[in-house]
Image (spheres, rainbow, N blue to C red):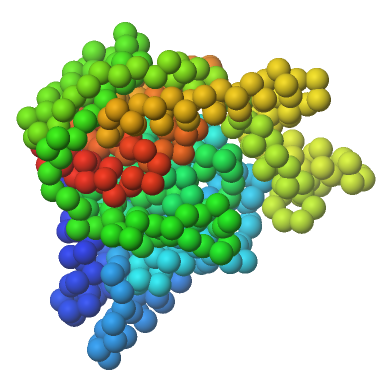
Amino acid sequence: MSSVLSKSQWPSIASISTDVQNGKSKALDLVELAYKTLENSNEFNSVISTTKKRAIGIAKDIDSRVKKGQKIGKLAGVPFIAKDNFLTFGGETTAASNILKGFNAPYQATAIERLEAEGAICVAKANLDAFGHGASTENSDFYTTKNPHDQKRVPGGSSGGSAAAVILDIVPFALGTDTGGSIRLPASFCGAVGYKPTYGLVSRSGVIAMASSTDTIGPLTRNIADAALILDIISGKDELDGTTIEKDKLGYTNLPTHIKGKKIGIVAEFMGKGVDPGVRSRIEDTLKELKNAGAELVEVSIPSISLALACYYIICPAEVSSNLSRYDGQRYGHTSNMSGNIEDSYNWSRSEGFGSEAKRRILIGTYVLSSGYYDAYYKKAQTLRTKLIKEFNEIFNKVDFLAGPVSPVTAFKIGQNIKDPLQMWLVDILTVAPSLTGSPAVSVPAGYSDGMPVGIQLIAPTGKDRDLLALASVTEKVI
């Protein structure tokens, strides 16, 4: 196992690109290195499929252009992996669900297009909980990804394959999606950096929807500098996504290097008795180091945050129910052979194609949206969400950032929670609030508890992604 978790074979993303541009290394060699490393770590099930033929073709083209003296971009020759809910060319896009087996995307996600425009090369598609429904990658219809630190444990979810691929050193970065913690949780469980940007900062065009009002796209990397560079490239307005917002005029690289005088609110509800003592200890140690670096620590309370998980698991299934209605077996994806008429075709195709977690969320979502229960559940949840946003805004008038654990526990064992959906949902208890408010949040490695990684969660006001990355960079250095 030590060989898997040794120091990364990849230098910084900027260095990789510079070496390719200067002819010191070749894009084709980097792509082949990624595939060799993937082959040596197949037992972890981090990847669903590869885009090998296309990736090699792009790498050869980049090397040819470099030889001719042409400029490529900020990510020249850098291989990466995309979570399999991103539409990409070169292979199937399945969202880890049987209902999309065999589906080849007619266009690519905006985030993929922007990365490729800068010379990055997508080499594979990462495993996930089907459609992003889960916190452990056990809800994939294909197989469970294993934690790089302990194969008996989960990598977190739903971007578990992406996080594992980075820590297994297959690629220097991977893309994930975060709806209620799906980038931050696997980053914490695997020991990676996982960045969830402000809602709307990165286009969702070409990314299979889970819950549209909280879905965000972000990078998983080994360090903050790489995460900041990737965010700088994929962020900003997109005419294909009406919810996108302008990026910071200063960008997200060349970050400030000090936090003197910054106020960090330690969320009391995040540090309660339900948090594992080892996890709490790592977070407290990190906060002490931030205080030594010049930050002011302030204990704060957010009254409605204890209800955030219940709120999320009403709003999220409602949107899931709506978004999954398009998979009907008629236009693309799985079509059942059991059907004798159109109604049977709908029923059988969805019954065979969706896994148990997707069905569970469809049923809950349809229930809370039904005419007899809309006011009792969905409307109340949206009212609570508005209240939570107001409380976050009030707190951010007093402090610059919020901090606490990403998860109350470290990575749990495979199979431990799979038969108890409520217990599995509780894993998201500390990550859903920033998703509901649209706030940027990041998981930064904060050491280990009983041999497993612990992540500290840092949260900023909406739109303050540059400030958050600066704090995360300082946090990385003091740890």
Between residues 465 and 358, which one lies in front from this camera angle?
465
Q: Residue at x 67, y 43 (%)?
A: 323
Which residue is outermost to the right? Answer: 341
Q: Quadrant of the N terminus?
A: top left
Q: Where does the image place residue 423, in percent across and percent down from the top left?
A: 48, 17
Which residue is outermost to the bottom? Answer: 68
How many numbered discs, if any? 0
- Residue 415 visible: no
In this rendering, the answer to whether 419 lies above or below 444 is above
In this rendering, the answer to whether 451 lies above or below 61 is above
- Residue 27 visible: yes
Between residues 171 and 265, which one lies in front from this camera angle?
265
Q: Quadrant of the C terminus?
A: top left
Q: Where does the image place residue 303, in percent across and percent down from the top left?
A: 43, 15
Between residues 229 and 396, which one lies in front from this camera angle?
396
Q: Residue at x 48, y 50 (%)?
A: 200
Where on the picture, by quarter, is residue 116?
A: bottom left
Q: Residue at x 25, y 18 (%)?
A: 299
Q: Where does the image place residue 383, in percent across and percent down from the top left?
A: 60, 25
Between residues 67 and 295, which one lies in front from this camera angle?
295
Q: Where does the image place residue 190, in percent across and percent down from the top left?
A: 30, 36
Q: Residue at x 31, y 78 (%)?
A: 72
Which residue is outermost to the left? Answer: 292
In this rendering, the answer to whether 27 lies above or below 390 is below
